[in-house]
Amino acid sequence: MPVQWGVPFGGLLVAQALAAATATTASDLWPRSLHAYFVGVGSDEEPVDLRVADVADSKATAWRSVDVSQGGRLLLRAEAMFSRDRPGPDHARTMPQVPAPDDLTNVGVDLAPYPGTFTPWGPDSAFDLRHVDAPPRIAAEATGPGEATSQVWLKAGGADPGDPRLAAALLAYASDMCMLDACLRPAGLWFGDGSASGLTLDHSMWFHAPARVDDWLLLDLHSPAMRGGRGLGVADIYARDGELLCSVAQLGSIRPQRPATPG
């Protein structure tokens, strides 16, 4: 899936790496953590190659390393860990109270009046994405700089694959789309003409429970810090019933193109 600027979508590369690693593990192991580093920028006009290395296997855990390359150039390197659940204590953060997704509109619809703005998912895309608060482009015009937070509902447009291991890869795909939103808000920036450009440097996920992607998932995002053109976005991902499914962290490069002048 290309994303407007002729480069492969980072979330797709992460999802492919996780799916490839998953295929080499026992069927009763499911992903627990993933750490991916983007080391090159590719083209959306060439296929990518994936190479999985077996790092180690124990009775209940497996580790894999995946290289994603294109034309002999390394684009992404990912490390993944898989395990079975074990008995033990548990706790989880409570999902915040937010408006229901049925009361919100698709981000592509929201941003349609703003030419040149990065519009990742329209109504006909693989995932439906709906901001609880305004997308960065609209927030920058309406209120200027704001808090380093964002909340987004998302849901796959198609059926869940029925395999929580593959659903984890789809969740990895979706999680890359808005992880840097909270980084943009304090500076009143957005991705698109006249504001900021950005790219992902690394992407990490910790899977707490199996997810279904054909029902609404809430991403509760915040940015602890941004400095030197590097912004950190952190998110908890909840099922619609409030179960915490996954935690995500992403470091991105964010560079203002010129002073933001909404409108």
Image (cartoon, rainbow, N blue to C red):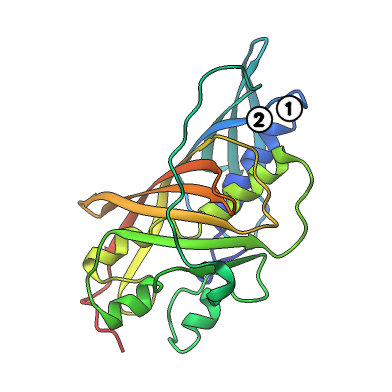
Amino acid type indicated by mark 1 = Thr
Question: Residue 38: in sight, yes or no?
Answer: no
Q: Nearer the viewer, mark 2 or mark 1?
A: 1
The image quarter in which residue 55 lies: top right
- With respect to residue 173, does 249 lie above or below? above
* In the rendered image, the vertical position of residue 33 relative to residue 261, given as above or below: above
> What mark, if any, has residue 85 been given in the picture?
none
At label 2, which amino acid type do we have?
A: Val
Question: Residue 42 placed where, x, y %?
Answer: 53, 55
Q: Is residue 179 left or right of residue 229?
A: right
| Residue closer to the observer: 153 or 59 | 153
| Residue drawn at 53 percent across, 75 percent down | 104
Residue in the image at 24% along x and 83% along y: 261
> How many marks do you count on the picture?
2
Circle nearer the N terminus (2, 1): 1
Res. 186 visible in picture? yes
Q: Which mark is residue 52?
A: 2
Q: CA distance from mark 2 to mark 1?
A: 8 Å
User: How packed is label 2: few (under 14 Cα within 10 Å), some, or many (20 or more)?
Assistant: some
**Image location of residue 157, percent across then percent down:** 70, 65
Question: Neighbour class for label 1 at 10 Å: few (<14), some, many (≥20)?
Answer: few
Q: Residue furthest top?
A: 59
Q: Which residue in the structure is indicated by mark 1?
A: 24
Circle 1 SS class: loop
> Which residue is rendered at x = 43% and y = 61% of the image?
151
